[in-house]
Amino acid sequence: MTNKTVDNLSATHLDKLILAAFERISQLLRSSLWEHAKKENLSPIQIQFLIYIASHPGRFSTVSEIAREFSLTPPTVSDAIKSLETKNLIQRMHSRKDKRKYLLTLTRDGQNLTHNLKQWSGPYYTCLGKHSVKEKRQVIKFLLEFLISVGESGLMLDLKSCFSCDFLLQSEAENEGKKRCIFRNVTLNEMDFRLNCVDYKSSMPVK
């Protein structure tokens, strides 16, 4: 067996380990979220919608945007939203720019509940705190680059990330190849890139 063959086998093994780790982490996070959902008499998807609306104010908090974000049909999202409205956790408000559209916002009860729900991730932040900033920088760099590859391959819908945003500027002459957000007026490094950015403006042409 040649060194090249051994390297290829090692790379394949690493790929399998990485995907297995992703799957296990996803299961752990989902299980923790479900346990909190049971305590609040909510379904896991309702919990996810509340957290999404809390972190996506404005134009991204619509039924159509939520359906796109979670790869669900609008009727499925509407059913969950109606249930949350009945429980006085969210409310609909007319968009200022387009009166035909409704934006979803949290009620005071919804805000309080969402704040408590976020505590489910506390133990995971404690575990992350055991690792150095250098290690986490390396991890986030890899994960962001991986997500770019996934997005470019068509396996995932738009992440509302810097990489496909119209506000992203790259000028090798001015910034030595570094990327810059012209909305925030900052040069971006691994710590500055965002996913699901509320200021996102797609650079993709409208079909």
Image: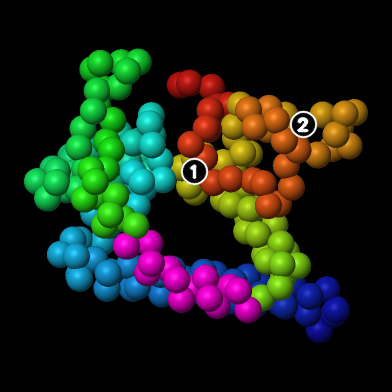
Residue 170, numbered label: 2
Q: Relative to 11, does residue 155 appear above or below in the rendering?
A: above
Q: Relative to 62, does residue 9 appear above or below in the rendering?
A: below
Number of disc labels: 2
Looking at this rendering, what residue extends furthest in the bottom direction? 1
Residue at 32% from the left image edge and 62% from the top image edge: 116
> Which residues, given as a range, are shown in magenta?
116-130
Report x, y in % for residue 47: 27, 57
Q: Relative to 195, does residue 167 appear above or below in the rendering?
A: above
Answer whether residue 121 is magenta in the image: yes
Residue 168 seen in render: no
Report x, y in % for residue 133: 71, 67
As measured in the structure, the alpha-carbon distance from the residue carrying label 2 to the one carrying label 1 is 20 Å
Badge 1 density bin: few <14, some 14–19, many ≥20, Cα 10 Å: some
Q: Quadrant of the N terminus?
A: bottom right
Badge 2 density bin: few <14, some 14–19, many ≥20, Cα 10 Å: some
Residue at 48% from the left image edge and 47% from the top image edge: 156
- For label 2, the SS is strand
Three-letter amino acid code at disc 2? Gln
Colouring chosen for the image of the structure: rainbow
Report x, y in % for residue 3: 85, 79
Answer whether residue 75 is magenta in the image: no
Drawn side of residue 61 relative to residue 165, left or right: left
- For label 1, the SS is loop
Magenta span: helix, strand or loop, mainly?
Answer: helix
Drawn side of residue 98 relative to residue 83, left or right: right
Residue at 60% from the left image edge and 74% from the top image edge: 129
User: Which residue position is annotated with label 1?
Assistant: 196
Three-letter amino acid code at disc 1? Asn
Residue at 30% from the left image edge and 22% from the top image edge: 95
Report x, y in % for residue 92: 21, 32
